[in-house]
Image (tube, rainbow, N blue to C red):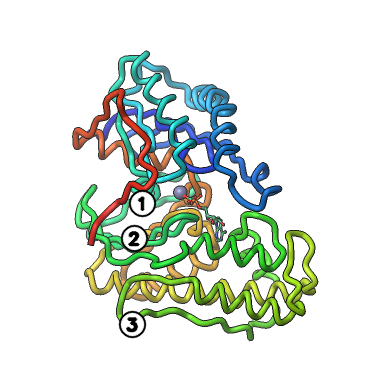
């Protein structure tokens, strides 16, 4: 079966401008990402207007580079896909209008894609560097990003049942906030991972929010506990990026304690949900899936439970165009199309319970 053929996919929902050419939802011909991370680091977070302007600045050069790297032409393309939501309205608008214009000018169908579906479908992308099997249904997937944290069951392509979600902060958001409390640069996720890797003692234990048998998550209590501990140890002065009164060793231990708490809850609930659903594969996606400790811990737990983990390489876990092309292949086959009136949907949900 053909799965959409060659799709040109555009992602601009947050702070990465991504364009990819993906064949049959699996083979990446090119995948170019212009990241604004360095630009937003100075402000300690994303400034929406600044993000939208940067997408405007970079989207054409990113497209040029995607074509140059792919060695294909417009004649080979079956559709243009774009993230319609969820995300920042201004950022989404840039990608949507760009994709609409490309589809119109080149006479190609336009396929709208849910950003979260993109994170899920990143697990279907092939990897040149290593053999990755396709996930087998039923799939239980954990998606952990800067804006979302949820567990979803997939019994077939494009068929989702929400098992649980965060009731407060997303996991990535918690990493970013605690990173800031520790005086680490933005974004906190990768910085906490790096700092924690240097911990020689592992005796900082932060609380875990189990929420009974539920598959929901909560990270606000953990964040508060981390804030209290850090305030107590710094005499309540707090910290700012690059200027922490905490010794490096202590930052490493606190980062390790925080990361252990997040990973413990994510792994335990995911395996419990996968068992309950009779899953044949466990999928991990979203920016926080770039975290090595989470990847290793979930892989080991899934293996022990007899359900292999499928997790894309880190560059495909954080926002990129290829993941949108992967989901678009199945959307295209299912007949999903958008007209030139496609609008940004900042709070588009993926699934219901
Ligand atoms: O999926 P993503 O690129 O953008 C959203 O859709 O939100 O996720 C970004 C989030 C940020 O919160 C960032 O700190 C987190 O993913 N992140 C990580 C790591 N790399 C990125 N969190 C923990 N460990 C990492 N290595
Ligand atoms: Zn994302």
Is the residue under label 3 in contact with that under label 2 (CB below 8 Å)?
A: no
Of tags 3 and 1, the one toward the viewer is 3
Crowding around mark 2 (Cα neighbors within 10 Å: few <14, some 14 to 19, many 20+) is: many
Q: Which mark is residue 120?
A: 1
Q: Quadrant location of residue 231?
A: bottom right
Q: Classify mark 3: helix, strand or loop.
A: loop
Q: Give the residue displayed 67% in from the left and 49% down from the top.
A: 43
Q: Considering only vertical position in the picture, is 352 above or below 201?
A: above
Marks 2 and 1: in contact by CB < 8 Å?
yes
Residue at image coords 48%, 26%: 70
Locate residue 79: give its quadrant. top left
Q: Nearer the viewer, residue 226 or 27?
A: 226
The label shown at residue 141 is 2
Which is nearer the N-term, disc 1 or disc 2? 1
Q: Badge 1, how many Cα within 10 Å: few under 14, some, many 20+?
A: many
210 sits to left or right of 313: left
Viewer-closest of 126 and 138: 138
Instruction: Give the quadrant of residue 24.
Output: top left
User: Mark 3 — residue?
Assistant: 212
Q: Position of residue 271 (x, y in %)?
A: 34, 73
Front position in the image: 4 or 196: 196
Separation of disc 3 and disc 1 at Cα? 26 Å
Give above or below for 223 relative to 113.
below
Q: CA distance from mark 2 to mark 3?
A: 20 Å
Q: Position of residue 288 (x, y in %)?
A: 50, 59
Q: Are marks 3 and 1 in contact (CB under 8 Å)?
A: no
- Packing grade of label 3 (10 A; few <14, some 14-19, many >=20) is few
Marks 1 and 2, how far apart at CA: 7 Å
Residue 124 horizontal/vertical position (percent): 35, 47
Identify the mark nearer the N-term, 3 or 1. Answer: 1
Question: Which SS class for mark 2?
Answer: strand
């Amino acid at each position: 079966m053909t799965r959409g053929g060659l799709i040109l996919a555009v992602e601009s929902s947050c702070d990465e401008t991504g364009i990819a050419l993906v064949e049959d939802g699996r083979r990446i011909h090119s995948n170019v990402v212009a990241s604004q991370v360095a630009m937003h680091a100075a402000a300690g977070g994303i400034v929406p207007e600044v993000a939208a302007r940067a997408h405007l600045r970079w989207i054409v050069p990113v497209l040029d580079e995607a074509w140059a790297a792919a060695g294909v032409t417009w004649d080979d393309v079956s559709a243009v896909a774009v993230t319609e939501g969820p995300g920042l309205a201004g950022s989404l608008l840039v990608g949507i209008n760009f994709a609409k214009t490309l589809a119109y000018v080149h006479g190609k169908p336009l396929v709208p894609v849910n950003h979260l579906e993109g994170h899920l479908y990143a697990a279907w992308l092939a990897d040149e560097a290593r053999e990755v099997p396709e996930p087998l249904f039923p799939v239980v997937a954990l998606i952990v990003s800067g804006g979302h944290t949820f567990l979803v069951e997939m019994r077939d392509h494009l068929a989702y049942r929400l098992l649980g979600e965060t009731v407060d902060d997303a996991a990535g958001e918690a990493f970013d906030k605690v990173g800031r409390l520790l005086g680490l640069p933005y974004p906190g996720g990768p910085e906490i991972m790096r700092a924690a890797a240097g911990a020689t003692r592992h005796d900082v234990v932060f609380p875990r929010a189990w929420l009974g048998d539920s598959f929901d998550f909560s990270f606000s209590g953990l964040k508060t506990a981390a804030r209290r501990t850090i305030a107590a140890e710094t005499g309540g002065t707090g910290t700012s990026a690059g200027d922490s009164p905490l010794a490096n060793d202590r930052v490493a231990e606190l980062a390790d304690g925080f990361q252990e708490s997040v990973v413990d809850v994510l792994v335990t609930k995911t395996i419990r949900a996968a068992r309950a659903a009779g899953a044949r594969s466990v999928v991990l996606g979203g920016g926080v899936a770039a975290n090595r400790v989470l990847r290793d811990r979930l892989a080991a737990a899934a293996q022990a439970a007899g359900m292999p983990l499928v997790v894309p390489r880190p560059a495909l876990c954080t926002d990129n165009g290829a993941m949108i092309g992967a989901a678009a292949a199945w959307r295209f086959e299912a007949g999903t199309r958008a007209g030139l009136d496609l609008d940004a949907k900042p709070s588009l949900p993926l699934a219901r319970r």
